[in-house]
Image (cartoon, rainbow, N blue to C red):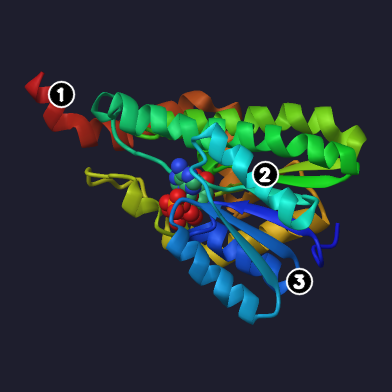
Amino acid sequence: MEPKGKVVIVTGASSGIGEATAREFAKEGAKVVLAARRVDKLQTLAEEINKMGSEAFVVQADLSKLEDIQKLVAETLAKFNRIDVLVNNAGFGRLDWLENLDPVKDIQAQIDVNVMGVIQTTRQVLPVMMKQRSGSIINMCSMAGLVATPTYTIYAASKHAVHGFSEALRREVKPWGIDVSLVYPGGVVTEFASHAGIKRKTKATTPKFMLLTAEQVAQAVVKLVRKPKRMWIIPWLWSVSVFMNRFLPGLVDSTTINRFTIPEREDELKKM
Ligand SMILES: NC(=O)c1ccc[n+]([C@@H]2O[C@H](COP(=O)([O-])OP(=O)(O)OC[C@H]3O[C@@H](n4cnc5c(N)ncnc54)[C@H](OP(=O)(O)O)[C@@H]3O)[C@@H](O)[C@H]2O)c1
């Protein structure tokens, strides 16, 4: 699908990957629907896009609320009368040992946005794309959707859910001319870390040369509209850890536990 003139919904367009993705689609001449909670940020981006000569439409939506998702789809249809591309990008992680996570604000909230938000938005958009007999759905997964590491319990669970949901959906909707693609970025420099509530000092960080910019991920998303892919791991070097996790899980377990978990939890262990 060529993005020019297409109607593209980007969720989580108020910062990071979503913001960069909306900008990238606008550069390609698409009509972009910007959704998130921080409407002031969406308005600023919309003004920038409109100045570029492309069209942007703002819908304030909390993706954890079904009524907001229904409003997003209804307002998009009222404005443009079709939906060609859905980028399910909104999401966040709260990264701490499981017992430290708040049952509602950290655990339930992550599942509500990262999993239910993706499922319910897709569910609302799907009949429109089926009627059109065309569409492209791009789901923002994560390396955590393939390899789960300590303190990522809920985030990894949410992204594994996105992985499974997308795989099944891809096999359901292809006959209607709808493609489902998944992106698995490693670390990306965005506001993500500032919302993650990371308190611990850890050696488990992404090496600098593997860090991505939001623009690099955005460019990948646009490419997926042109040429859909089942899975796109970026940067590709992370495929090595996916391979290791799949075929040598015992080695990955012992390395992670001995190199990261035990040294980081040593003081707590001694106290118990
Ligand atoms: N950064 C990374 O290292 C990384 C790596 C792999 C995957 N990802 C994934 O990439 C996606 C984007 O993250 P990012 O890195 O760009 O982080 P970010 O800059 O913090 O952006 C997150 C976006 O999600 C939106 N969002 C969060 N909760 C929402 C809610 N309840 N309703 C509507 N929108 C909501 C935020 O908008 P409002 O706050 O305005 O609502 C914001 O626009 C996420 O799905 C994340 O899991 C990130």
Q: In this orientation, does residue 257 appear?
A: no
- The residue lying furthest to the top in this view is 272
Name the residue beneath numbered marker 2.
Answer: 73
Q: Nearer the viewer, mark 3 or mark 2?
A: 2
Q: In this orientation, does residue 100 appear?
A: yes
Identify the mark nearer the N-term, 3 or 2.
3
Name the residue beneath numbered marker 3.
Answer: 29
SS class, disc 1: helix
Query: In x, y percent, where is residue 94?
Result: 35, 39
Instruction: Tell me the residue at 54%/57% (across/down).
Output: 13
Tell me if 102 is positioned left or right of 270 in this view. right
Instruction: Tell me the residue at 80%/50% (across/down).
Output: 82
Residue type, numbered disc 2: Val
Residue type, numbered disc 3: Gly
Q: Nearer the viewer, residue 68 or 160?
A: 68
Identify the mark nearer the N-term, 2 or 1.
2
Query: In x, y percent, where is residue 207?
Result: 42, 57
Does any atom of ligand 1 lie closer than 8 Å to the CB of label 2? no
Q: Quadrant of residue 174?
A: top right
Name the residue beneath numbered marker 1.
Answer: 269
Decide: is 193 above or below 141: below
Which quadrant of the figure contains the N terminus?
Answer: bottom right
SS class, disc 3: loop
Rounded to the nearest angstrom, the CA distance separating label 3 from label 1 is 56 Å
Residue type, numbered disc 1: Leu
